[in-house]
Amino acid sequence: MQNIKKTQQVSFKFPDSKIPVQNSPRDGFLVIENVSKVYQTPKGPYTVLEEVNLDVKEGEFICLIGHSGCGKSTLLNMVAGFSEPTDGEVRLQGEAITEPGPDRMMVFQGYALLPWKTAFENVYLAVNSVYPKKSESQKVAITRQHLAMVGLTEAADKKPKQLSGGMKQRVSIARALAIRPQVLILDEPFGALDAITKEELQEELLKIWTDHRCTVLMITHDIDEALFLADRLVMMTNGPHAKIGEVLEISFPRPRDRTRIMEDPEYYKLRNYALDFLYHRFAHDDAS
Amino acid sequence: MSVSITPRKKRNKQAVGFLPGLLADKKSRKIVAPIIAIGFFLIVWQLFSFGPDANLPGPIKVVSQTWELIINPFFDKGATNKGLFWQIFASLQRVAIGFTLAAIVGISLGIVVGTNGFLFDALDPIFQVLRTIPPLAWLPISLAAFQQANPSAIFVIFITSIWPIILNTIVGVQQIPQDYVNVSKVLQLSRREYFMDIVFPATVPYIFTGLRIGIGLSWLAIIAAEMLIGGVGIGFFIWDAWNAANISQIILALVYVGVVGLLLDKLIGFIAAKVVPDEQK
């Protein structure tokens, strides 16, 4: 536990890497400032997160990694507006986030599709609610277009029960993107999928992100997934009193090709560094 | 359905007779087996009623003594002297009014209380006490309040059937998965959309469980209430027959009461099958 106290948020760079320090003018698009979250429990206050600071640039793809219980979901829930920080502030374009809204759409861990609605109806519900002024045919067109984008034109009239896990996640992504959020929040979206579907969806997500360029915050447990997708990998220390341990810049050129990246020696440096962080320096309590 | 671990024996299809054949087929067994059971019951009943000091008539005597009532359910000789159809119809009318009111009030109240933590904490203990009060215990209160027999009976139906409807609706609302609530929050659904697209479909199976229990209870209550308040109705018909020492009529009425109760339950089940989304069953 001692080393946790020493850790500060540092933008990690390899001494030998040539990552340029980016200071784009769009800095401060999404700002997480001194955020702490304390839950009151019968045994007294329980501090999940303490003094978390993160600046996210517009259009950036951020992955969060950390052991379970480190407050990743708590942090993203505060960005989504489901809960408010006990201390500090989350700001989107300078405005404090106080409640959930479609500008920060979430792809939920369990897909959160309404089981009594078809894939089409699930997406349409979102479109209809967010664009009340558009005509019926426009809303239908937007819905169809986004279902097509994730390759679900055929399955549009199926209900979630008839869809595989990967297809459900596609519907969930289509629903999220159809309302053009400024920030897309994904809570471990591919955790429950098999390896092949997972890779397919990662590639689709990356392609869609390249086309639409929204800001992405994504929780993952998979270092390879993060290295393939993210611009930066935020590594969290263990809870309680979790904070951002280090932020790893991932500067592989885009569009990224999985095989090419994996051949890059840099890939293994980053990977080993992240592994070392997670399994040695901040090994989970069970393991230590 | 039972799960058999040992492999099923192959049936010898050539050797089976007519009845064993019907029983071997699972579908026809559903019909044939109860008929056998009823037949067996009637025979035993008949045998018991042959005894010298039997107080109750056997099935043959019941049918012969009530034959007029069986073949002629629609007669109407004024006052309470009406055919069994009209007696049951009168009871069903009371149930329909009382139960419909209970459903409307119960579902609305259940949704409000289920979505409001304060109201739930405030009212749940009261509901838990009130629901244990037997239907007939409400009758004197309701007679005192309404001063008339018919509204009192309807109130007893209402107050009997409302508790399971309220309590099940509350549970239904409270069990709406947090994910669905979060979806509605992030999409900022209007209250109407939230209710129609999320609360109602998620809660409707629970509502129907409550309605099904409620209709059963209200049919139980109406018979008892009518015995006390009199007038046209199957409950008072039974009481009237008892005063006339006509046991056969009572037995016939009991059969009708049972069948109607079953049909009411099936009716709610049928509506539920139409209304509840497939995914929620």
Image (spheres, coloured by chain):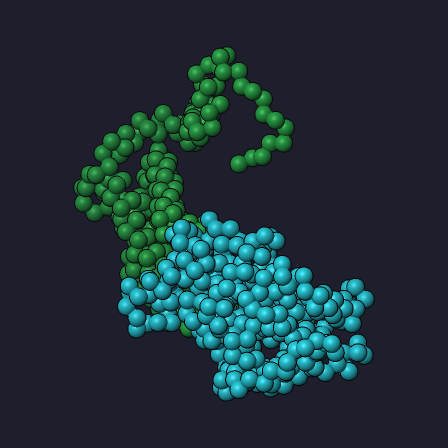
Chain colours: A cyan, B green
Give the farthest residue toward the top: B15
Name the side, left or right, on which B194 lies relative to B120.
left
Q: Residue at x 66, y 84 (%)?
A: A51
Q: Quadrant of residue B156?
A: bottom left
Which of A192/A17 is in front?
A: A17
Tell me residue A169's x, y (percent): 51, 58
Q: Residue at x 58, y 22 (%)?
A: B9
Tell me residue A231's x, y (percent): 60, 73
Which of A165/A84 is in front?
A: A165
Reply above or below: B265 against B163.
above
Which of A13/A287 is in front?
A: A13
Tell me residue B231's x, y (percent): 27, 50
Q: Quadrant of residue A228?
A: bottom right
Q: Is residue B133 visible?
A: no
Tell me residue A73's x, y (percent): 60, 71
Q: Is residue B157 visible?
A: yes
Q: Quadrant of residue B197?
A: bottom left
